[in-house]
Image (tube, grey):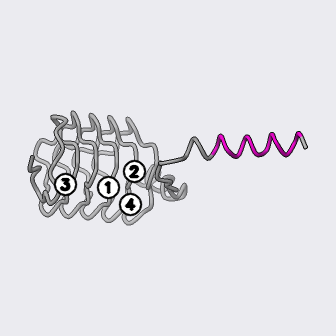
Amino acid sequence: MRTGSAAFLTAMVVCALFAGRAVYGFNQEDLNTLIATNQCPRCDLSGANLSGLVLNGKDLVGANLSGANLSGANLSGTDMNGVNLSGANLNGAVLNGTDLSGTDLSGTDLTGADLTKTDFSGAKLDNASWTDGQTCNPGSIETCDQ
């Protein structure tokens, strides 16, 4: 009986830790491909911890990076056309000259990010946290309407 109680308590703790959080599952093979080849178009890196990585100049067209942690990452000159970055953390990231056209940035944290010469053509910015910490209004496309 004691073993059953311990298992139940463990299960309850695990459930409490994940309650209210989106569960993401990136593909480890896709991450290995990105690191080895400097490209990973249409790959699944949802929820991956890529914080602080140097990813400048890589090809990530159409990739799924929803919920990924890219805080402090260098994405300068990266082709991210059509990428799903919804709910991603780009706090303090360097996106100088990055192509974010057609990208879903809904709910993304861009606080303190370097967006110099970044292409936001057709990018969805609903409820994104802009570089100044202000939240973009729902319906913001290409520019952060506050």
| Residue that mark 4 sits on | 64
Q: Which residues are magenta?
A: 2-14
Residue that protrudes farthest toward the right in the picture: 1
Reading the chain from its start, which is encountered first: label 3 or label 2?
A: 2
Marks 3/4 in contact by CB < 8 Å: the verdict is no
| Residue that mark 1 sits on | 86
Amino acid beneath label 1? Ser
Amino acid beneath label 4? Asn
Across and down, in percent, residue 18 comes to 55, 46
Asked if the magenta segment contains residue 117, the reply would be: no
Across and down, in percent, residue 16 comes to 59, 42
Q: Residue at x 34, y 48 (%)?
A: 88
* Number of the front mark, 3 or 4: 3
Q: Residue at x 23, y 36 (%)?
A: 111
Estimate the spatial distance between the alpha carbons at disc 3 and disc 2, rounded to whole Å. 15 Å
Reading the chain from its start, which is encountered first: label 2 or label 1?
A: 2
Left or right: 21 in relation to 139? right
